[in-house]
Image: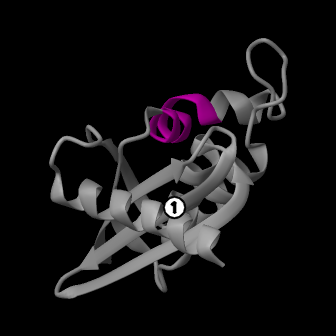
Amino acid sequence: MNEVVIYTDGACRGNPGPGGWGALLRSGSHEKALSGFEAATTNNRMELTAALMALRALKQPSRVVLWTDSEYLRKGMTEWLSAWRARGWKTAAKQPVKNADIWQALVVASEPHEVDWRWVKGHAGDPGNEAVDKLATEAIDIGLAK
């Protein structure tokens, strides 16, 4: 099985506001950078979108170590997801899960893979995290310039 290391990050100018996401995929000597922009979004949606787009970019089932500085993303996928699904995408307070559309897409995108969801402290000098932060913020700049 292919082994891939992924770094993801989302950014938003205002929350909500214009947002961007970035992902960096590394496998052996191969590296691929992805990014995107949304005119009106939230930081959490961009964090989730970065992971979703990175997983969708994988061409075959893989062992993935996915690094994120978002505890929302990591805990959602590792701790909260099974309860949300069991309750029909409702929180413990019986409210709809925010961003359920992206969470559901993440479930589908992650299913072919063995994903190890890991947290990295943001803006603390980790080269992978710094690279995807730059991709996400540049995506906002490019999107706003259009």
Report which quarter residue 63 is drawn in: bottom left
Label 1: state its secondary structure.
Answer: strand
On the rendered structure, is 15 left or right of 85? left
Where residue 62 appears, as percent x and y from the top left, is 39, 73
> Is residue 83 shown in magenta?
no
Span colored in magenta: 72-81
Q: Residue furthest top?
A: 93
The amino acid type found where label 1 is placed reads Trp
Quadrant in the picture for the N terminus: bottom left
* Residue 35 can be seen, yes or no: yes
Q: Residue furthest front?
A: 145
> Is residue 77 shown in magenta?
yes
Q: Which residue is mark 1?
A: 21
Where residue 33 appears, as percent x and y from the top left, is 38, 78
Label 1 crowd bin: few (<14), some (14–19), many (20+), radius 10 Å: many
Q: Residue at x 50, y 50 (%)?
A: 11
The answer to whether 85 is drawn above or below residue 26 in the figure is above
Q: How is the image coloured?
A: one colour
Closer-to-camera residue (1/128): 128
Q: Main secondary structure of the magenta part?
A: helix
